[in-house]
Image (tube, rainbow, N blue to C red):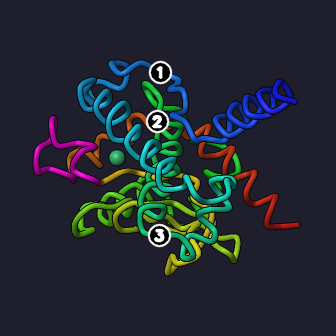
Amino acid sequence: MYKLVLILCLFVTIFSKAQEFSLPKLNYSFTSLEPVIDSVTMRVHYTKHHQGYVTNLNNALKSQPQKSLDSILMSVSKYPTAVRNNAGGHFNHTLFWECLTPGGRELKGDLLQEITKTYGSLDSLQKLMTTQGTTLFGSGWVWLIVNKENKLQVITSINQDNPIMDLAPIQGAPILGIDVWEHAYYLKYQNKRADYLKNIWKIINWEFVSAKYLDQTKKWKK
Ligand code: MN3
């Protein structure tokens, strides 16, 4: 009996640990996004800021039943503010890292067609996102989303909010997210957020963004 309890305790410990959120692996090195994003910014952003959101999210959820990150975000209004901030922070940064790649990737195919149809050109979309990100007051994000009408839309959010959250004013599926918090650019660009946003287009992984776009439009056509 004693042994059985011990084994059960061990199982519960391993199982509950496995449920905890963790920092995703980066597909590139801290130096490889230079000169657009410097390596010190990358290291601090990933190992301190993103890790902080993950640690704080796990702590904030200790007494709550564990769910997927998406399902937490979709009912985030029922959770304390700490969960809103840190679940948002974890989701947003995970997407952000995937949207970036050394040297960037070319945009082609269905998403290029849809961007051209909606905004006239990729250049116009980039200018719109740069302007919206630059004029957003305080800390937040600028997003390209597929909205509920299955159309592309550019929106911003404050703090670590995102368009998946049930309390978002405009909801949709984010396919590209750009961090405009000062911690994302200040060491290199200081107060020049617009310069950071103009440069970031050199390292956008449009292959990844296109794949997300196709996935999402398929899901919502069903
Ligand atoms: Mn950040």
Can you give x and y, in whole percent of width and height, for residue 166 in the image? 59, 75
64 over 24 or under it: above or below: below
Q: What is the spatial separation of the Cα atoms under label 1 and label 2, in whole angstroms?
A: 9 Å
Q: Which region is colored magenta?
A: 181-194
Question: Residue at position x 29%, y 40% from top?
Answer: 199
Can you give x and y, in whole percent of width and height, for residue 17 in the image? 64, 35
What's the magenta bit mostly, secondary-structure-wise? helix
> Which sits earlier in the primary sequence, circle 1 or circle 2?
1
Amino acid identity at mark 3? Pro
Q: Decide: marks 3, 1 in contact (CB < 8 A)?
A: no
Q: Which residue position holds label 1?
A: 28
Image quadrant where one finds the C terminus: bottom right
Can you give x and y, in whole percent of width and height, for residue 85 in the image? 41, 60
Q: Which residue position holds label 3?
A: 80
Which of discs 1 and 2 lies nearer the camera? The answer is 1
Q: Does residue 185 belong to the magenta stretch? A: yes
The image's mark for residue 100 is 2
